[in-house]
């Protein structure tokens, strides 16, 4: 008992430190007034388990009661809701303001089940895009009201309960008032005025009864809005499909527990160790840059532990490029890795040993100090797989059959030896119909799909009846279309460096092509058709006697102008000195655009770069060819995608084209209008 009391005393300050007066109140609430309150209201802390595991573990150690209500990926606010309900008398009311993700979040199934078994859900008000806190980030808030209604005898009453929904349609700028506080004062009064009506809608809010009775809900994600053609389509999709997680493996990527040195974990290192090894924030521990990896001079055997490491932003629809601008690598050490066989890797990790050993206490684990915290079966990363970032502006599923390792913000979908090709599943996941399904049934943050809170496992997959010739034909045609898309995407990726802005494989179909990168266009010419400023026969650089060309640093690029002597381009140095470049007007215009990217560099090095085309005609022809080719590839990809969308609609038995949604915001309210484009 003494040890337990000492542990509680040690843990108490980490969760909540009570004064003597607060302790007396706590004991009264805990015992004397338990289940006697008529009302409970709160704005609990929004703290997810990710990044705060120590807080959750401390709470569970301090109060073992909460183990009954613990669930992986949960939010701390879930416990507050359950706590509030446990203090209410029967028919008492609970009103909370929280984030709006728990009705569909993967880590909230226990909370939802508890609510269904102990309450009647009275009202749920979704504030959507309206900010209600002045400085908090990423707000998508809700207010909900629950009535305590527990016990087996009240089960029919709970099951027949209908839920009042209020959906805020506008944004802060559409509301009266200059500040968030004034916006809310107007909006809350407006909601109070209309919330008791059976149905109401204006430019600010929509009030209606959910088409779902409480008895139709389970611990799975709640889809509270039904009715209308779109929702009938959703039901059809779900009837035709089997949850992805039932037929395919879904895994998150690696959790190292120490990717790189951070401002927080560097404090765990002794000062002499930091000084001796010149350790700085940003240095790689498990995750290394190319330069960091090269500096270790690993042997061939040790390189077997080093794997290509991708970021979630490296994933595009259908495609994951193997040519990364800034490649990273992960040291993949598992529980059974004999670190003594890898002396150079051991020496590297030893520099950070206090950080690595700290993970054991933080996560409550006992694995070897050199191991990744969250390793996975390497087959997930090595073989054929569909990969998707945990957050994306549209359904974004790539495919890879090469080694691909990534953090836990990337999901890996692998086959359970199903008859359907993985490329077929890839097509379903990227289809317009599934994008429509996700937008209507899942709660993301704004326009972002978020697969952590709304898991991939629920996506309805249409199985193929391989005894049905029509099914087999659709399956095979879809797979061939996906292969063609991936081939075109690979070609498109090869042209990305010829454009400024996002890589071409990342663009949406409706996005225009970015601006051309003229220097990359020149580099794509044959060697005999490109020169440097020094070697081009028609380019002449002149300067006044007070300018030392060897010390000239480019600061600003002027515009091409015409003089009596011909076309010229002025270059301005940091010391306000001026150089002149004379030559063909069209070539000078190309040089002018390219030099904008070389400001701050010395002229001595700029002069040697072969970024000047031999003649402007060759440059323009190459630019036009690249522009035409990329446009053609994108059109072909779009046509292939349209064909896939049509076949997917046939498989699910829904009207063709229903999945292509256009969301527009009205000038006043900012609310979305959903429409079909046939």
Image: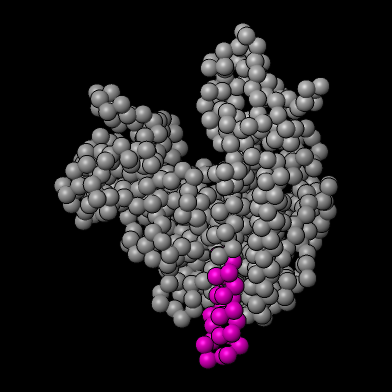
* Residue 179 spot, x, y in % from top left: 74, 32
Q: Residue at x 28, y 50 (%)?
A: 303
Q: Nearer the viewer, residue 420 or 10?
A: 420
Residue range of the region highlighted in magenta in the rendering: 460-486
Magenta stretch encompasses residue 483: yes
* Residue 298 spot, x, y in % from top left: 25, 44
Magenta stretch encompasses residue 578: no
Seen in the image, is 637 located left or right of residue 106? right
Is 4 drawn above or below residue 646 in the view shown?
above
Seen in the image, is 149 located left or right of residue 668? left
Q: Residue at x 40, y 50 (%)?
A: 309
Q: Residue at x 43, y 72 (%)?
A: 415
Colour style of the rendered protein structure:
one colour
* Residue 481 spot, x, y in % from top left: 59, 72
Q: Quadrant of the C terminus?
A: bottom right
Q: Nearer the viewer, residue 433 or 130?
A: 433
Q: Furthest-left residue in view?
A: 340
Kindly tell me whether residue 632 is visible in this rendering. Answer: yes
Q: How many marks?
A: 0
Q: Quadrant of the N terminus?
A: top left
């Amino acid at each position: 008992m003494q040890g337990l009391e000492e542990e509680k005393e040690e843990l108490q300050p980490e969760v909540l430190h009570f004064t003597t007066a607060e302790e007396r109140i706590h004991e009264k609430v805990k015992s004397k007034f338990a289940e006697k309150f008529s009302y409970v209201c709160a704005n609990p802390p929004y703290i997810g388990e990710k990044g705060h595991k120590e807080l959750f573990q401390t709470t569970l150690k301090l109060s073992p009661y909460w183990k009954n209500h613990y669930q992986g990926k949960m939010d701390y606010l879930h416990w507050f809701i359950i706590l509030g309900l446990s203090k209410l008398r029967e028919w008492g009311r609970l009103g909370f303001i929280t984030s709006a993700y728990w009705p569909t979040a993967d880590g909230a199934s226990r909370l939802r089940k508890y609510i269904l078994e102990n309450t009647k859900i009275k009202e749920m008000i979704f504030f959507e895009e309206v900010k209600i806190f002045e400085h908090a980030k990423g707000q998508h808030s809700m207010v909900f009201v629950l009535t305590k209604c527990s016990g087996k005898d009240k089960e029919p009453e709970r099951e027949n309960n209908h839920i009042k929904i209020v959906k805020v349609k506008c944004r802060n700028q559409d509301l009266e008032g200059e500040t968030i506080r004034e916006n809310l004062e107007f909006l809350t009064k407006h909601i109070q005025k209309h919330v008791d009506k059976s149905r109401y809608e204006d430019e600010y809010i929509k009030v209606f009864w959910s088409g779902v009775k409480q008895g139709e809900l389970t611990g799975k994600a709640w889809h509270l809005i039904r009715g209308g053609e779109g929702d009938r389509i959703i039901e059809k999709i779900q009837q035709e499909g089997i949850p992805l997680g039932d037929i395919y493996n879904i895994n998150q990527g690696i959790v190292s527990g120490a990717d790189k040195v951070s401002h927080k974990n560097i404090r765990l290192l002794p000062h002499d160790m930091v000084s001796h090894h010149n350790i700085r924030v940003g240095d790689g521990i498990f995750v290394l840059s190319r330069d960091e990896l090269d500096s270790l001079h690993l042997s061939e055997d040790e390189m077997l532990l080093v794997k290509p490491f991708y970021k979630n932003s490296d994933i595009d629809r259908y495609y994951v490029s193997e040519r990364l601008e800034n490649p990273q690598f992960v040291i993949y050490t598992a529980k059974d890795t004999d670190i003594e066989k890898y002396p150079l890797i051991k020496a590297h990790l030893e520099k950070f040993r206090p950080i690595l050993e700290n993970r054991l206490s933080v996560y409550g684990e006992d694995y070897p100090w050199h191991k990744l915290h969250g390793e996975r079966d390497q087959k997930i990363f090595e073989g054929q797989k569909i990969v998707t970032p945990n957050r994306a502006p549209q359904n974004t599923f790539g495919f890879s059959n090469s080694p691909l390792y990534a953090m836990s913000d990337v999901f890996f979908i692998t086959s359970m030896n199903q008859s359907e090709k993985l490329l077929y599943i890839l097509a379903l996941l990227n289809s317009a119909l599934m994008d429509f399904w996700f937008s209507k049934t899942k709660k993301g943050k704004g326009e972002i799909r978020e697969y952590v809170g709304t898991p991939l496992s629920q996506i309805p997959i249409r199985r193929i009846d391989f005894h049905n010739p029509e099914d087999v034909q659709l399956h095979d045609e879809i797979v061939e279309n996906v292969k063609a898309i991936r081939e075109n995407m690979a070609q498109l990726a090869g042209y990305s460096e010829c454009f400024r802005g996002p890589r071409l494989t990342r663009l949406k179909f409706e996005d225009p092509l970015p601006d051309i990168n003229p220097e990359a266009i020149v580099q794509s010419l044959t060697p005999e058709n490109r020169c440097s400023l020094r070697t081009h026969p028609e380019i002449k650089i002149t300067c006044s006697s007070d300018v030392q060309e060897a010390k000239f640093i480019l600061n600003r690029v002027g515009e091409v102008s015409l003089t009596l002597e011909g076309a010229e381009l002025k270059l301005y140095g940091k010391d306000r000195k001026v150089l002149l470049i004379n030559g063909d007007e069209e070539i000078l215009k190309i040089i002018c655009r390219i030099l904008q990217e070389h400001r701050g560099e010395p002229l001595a090095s700029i002069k040697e770069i072969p970024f000047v085309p031999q003649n402007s005609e060759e440059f323009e022809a190459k630019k036009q060819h690249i522009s035409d080719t990329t446009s053609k590839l994108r059109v072909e990809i779009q046509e292939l995608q349209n064909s896939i969308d049509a076949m997917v609609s046939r498989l699910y038995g829904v009207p063709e084209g229903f999945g292509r949604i256009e969301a527009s915001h009205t000038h006043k309210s900012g609310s979305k209008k959903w429409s079909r484009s046939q």
